[in-house]
Image (spheres, rainbow, N blue to C red):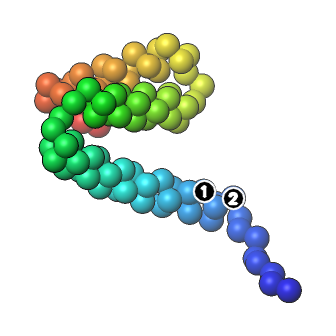
Amino acid sequence: MKTTAKQTARETYETRQREIAAMLDFLKCELEAHAEKAKADGLHWGHVGDLAHIRENLKETLVFAMGGRDEEVAGKMIEDAVADAMTGTAKRN
């Protein structure tokens, strides 16, 4: 019988942070692959819809990660941050 050591909350939290960072890196790679496929296929509205779906899921995840904030307020903060980033006026902490 195989036994596994229980991780502490801290160890598990740190593991989840690393997993999420790896997933974000993987997402970047997949977005690049999607762009290459869109270019090869001839860009069409289906490709745009794919990105809209990904964007909406990311926004939902960000609202959750912002925890405790009103969902509408958090959504506005995210949209404002995206708009600032798109115009190059993002605020740096």
Residue pictured at 64% horizontal, 61% vertical: 12
Residue pictured at 62% horizontal, 65% vertical: 11
Query: Please, what is the three-letter code of the amino acid marked with disc 1?
Result: Tyr
Secondary structure under badge 2?
helix
Number of other residues with Cα within 10 Å of mark 1, as a class: few under 14, some 14 to 19, many 20 or more: few
Number of other residues with Cα within 10 Å of mark 2, as a class: few under 14, some 14 to 19, many 20 or more: few
Residue ID for mark 2: 9
40 lies left or right of 60: left
| Quarter the N terminus occupies | bottom right
| Quarter the C terminus occupies | top left
Relative to 33, residue 58 above or below:
above
- What percent of the width, then of the height, locates residue 71? 53, 18
In depth, the one of 36 and 59 nearer the eye is: 36
Relative to 10, residue 61 above or below:
above
- Find out whether the residues at labels 2 and 1 contact each other: C-beta distance under 8 Å: yes
- What percent of the width, then of the height, locates residue 74? 47, 20
